[in-house]
Every structure is written in C-alpha cells, then in structure tokens.
Image (spheres, rainbow, N blue to C red):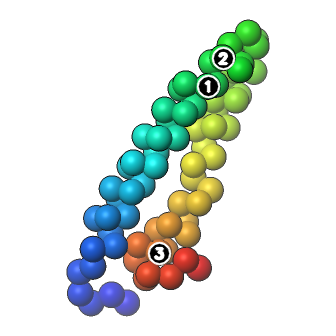
Amino acid sequence: MRTEPTLRIPLGILALLAALAVYAGVIANYAPGLIGDWPTLAQALVYLVLGLIWLLPLKRFIIWMETGRWG
C-alpha cells in the first residue's frame, strides 16, 4: 500500500484525459464518413462499442497509477 503521495496519479489523470480527447477527436473526425450512410440503429451500435472500447486498457492504467506496475 502506498504511504506517500506520488506524481503518477495526477500525471496519469492528465494523460488519460489527453488520450481520451485524442480518441474522441479521431472518432468524431473519421466515424461519420465511414458509417454516415448506415441505418440509425447500426450507427448507434457502432458508437456504443466505440464509446466503451476505451475502457479496455483502463484497469491496467489504474493499476499503474496506484502501484507503478502494469499488471
């Protein structure tokens, strides 16, 4: 257990916010051109999946912020 403050947490939060902003920008820029002609429900499903995909690496990232290890 961590007893002293570490810079990993605030830097990790800033890195996470920056990565999410880049990810959202890429999705907002390219997805409408690729799926814009699809039926509405198909588009909704794609955006739902894309909106949840960023959660996949989150567990390891939070572990790193707390412990300094990736696993």
The amino acid marked with disc number 2 is Gly
Residue 9 marker:
none
Q: Which residue is mark 2?
A: 33
Q: Quadrant of the N terminus?
A: bottom left
Residue 26 against residue 8 in the figure, above or below: above
Q: CA distance from mark 1 to mark 2?
A: 6 Å
Question: Is mark 1 in CB contact (under 8 Å) with mark 2?
Answer: yes
The secondary structure type at the circle numbered 2 is: helix
Residue at x 34%, y 73% (from the top left corner): 8
Residue 54 is situated, as x and y percent measured from the top left of the image, at 57, 49
Residue at x 70%, y 29% (from the top left corner): 46
Mark 2 vs mark 3: give the one in front.
2
Q: Which residue is mark 3?
A: 64
Residue 16 is situated, as x and y percent measured from the top left of the image, at 42, 55
The total of numbered circles placed on residues is 3
Please indicate whether residue 28 sits to the left or right of residue 1 in the image: right
Q: Does label 2 or label 3 sit earlier along the sequence?
A: 2
Question: Is any part of residue 8 visible from this angle?
Answer: yes
Q: Quadrant of the C terminus?
A: bottom right
Residue 30 marker:
1
The amino acid marked with disc number 1 is Tyr
Q: CA distance from mark 3 to mark 1?
A: 31 Å
